[in-house]
Amino acid sequence: MKIVNTIKTILLLSVVVILPSCLDLDPQDQMSDANLWQTPNDYKLYANQFYEWTRDFSSAVYDGPHSDTRSDLMTSSSYNEYSKGINNIPVSDGNYTGAYTKIRYANILLQKAESYPNPTDIARYVAEAKFFRAYEYFDLLQLFGDVIVVTEPIDITDPKMNAPRDDRSKVVDLIIEDLKQAIPDLPKENAIATADKGRVSQGAAQAFLSRVALYEGTWQKFRTGDVTRINDLLDIAAESAWEVIDSKQYEIFKPAELGTDAYKYLFILNSERFRLTV
């Protein structure tokens, strides 16, 4: 009997040793990093999160560079410390840490793409990552001016995040370079499949590049910046805007039903028949 029990015990232990530990199993509610970067669709699924970062009219109360929160245009049941001039410099800012968290996500995709065997297959999603990295750095530029330039995935607690801030010119150069690299690999608006409408187009990146260059060019112009750099930035703004126009992908909002009042209703209509089509 003892021999039988011993054999059973040995067999049971053998099974336990052979079976994988529950700690070695992949989680069922999310993809593991090892399985994520195998196909172009994996890169697309990862890039989908970038589209949660865009601004819209409902974010007017968000304390970001495009909101009216820090102005006298906002009112509520309590006073606005900014319009009353009694605000203090905060010791931390969610805009700062939030932007760097998003930049890290974009950098992860860009880092993984470096070892992908067929770069052409994922070029569009690499371009999207560069577009949105530029998008976040532009917010940081408008809010803080000089910020730390990070082009690799690091945690916000990494010692590199305590490095001295880079000059705003380096930030602008990264934004412009990211957008210039992204533009050739993004599809034109009329080439985007119906299911993918809303993803970044070539025209969107060109328009954004024009906006960034115009913003920084005029900022430098009215702060006695370098004349050559000012002219270079304004040239980029003009050339990029013209590329959008010359692409023939877009048209002026002017539905026949509205006639000469079209522009008046550009931002207040909510009807399918008045939406811009390309």
Image: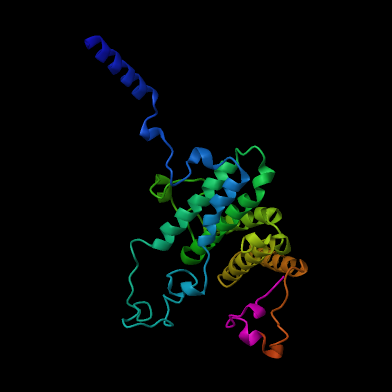
Above or below — where is 229 with respect to 39? below
Highlighted magenta segment, given as a residue range? 263-278
At which x and y percent is residue 257? 70, 87
Q: How is the image coloured?
A: rainbow
Q: Is residue 47 left or right of residue 183?
A: left
Q: Is residue 149 visible?
A: no
At which x and y percent is residue 62? 43, 70
Is-magenta flag for residue 96? no
Q: Is residue 169 left or right of residue 165?
A: right
Q: Quadrant of the C terminus?
A: bottom right
Q: Residue at x 67, y 89 (%)?
A: 261
Q: Is residue 68 visible?
A: yes
Q: Who is closer to the viewer here, 36 or 128?
A: 36
Above or below — where is 206 with respect to 87? above
Residue 191 is drawn in which quadrant? bottom right
Residue 19 is drawn in which quadrant? top left
At which x and y percent is residue 188? 72, 61
In the displayed image of the protein, which residue is found farthest to the front?
A: 1
At which x and y percent is residue 108? 52, 46
Q: Is residue 105 left or right of residue 266?
A: left
Q: Who is closer to the viewer here, 166 or 108?
A: 108
Above or below — where is 177 with respect to 108? below
Taken as a whole, is the magenta stretch helix, strand or loop? loop
Q: Is residue 218 left or right of residue 72?
A: right
In the displayed image of the protein, which residue is found farthest to the left?
A: 2
Q: Residue at x 58, y 59 (%)?
A: 172
Q: Who is closer to the viewer here, 60 or 277?
A: 277
Q: Quadrant of the N terminus?
A: top left
Q: Residue at x 47, y 41 (%)?
A: 32
Is-magenta flag for residue 272? yes
Q: Residue at x 52, y 39 (%)?
A: 35
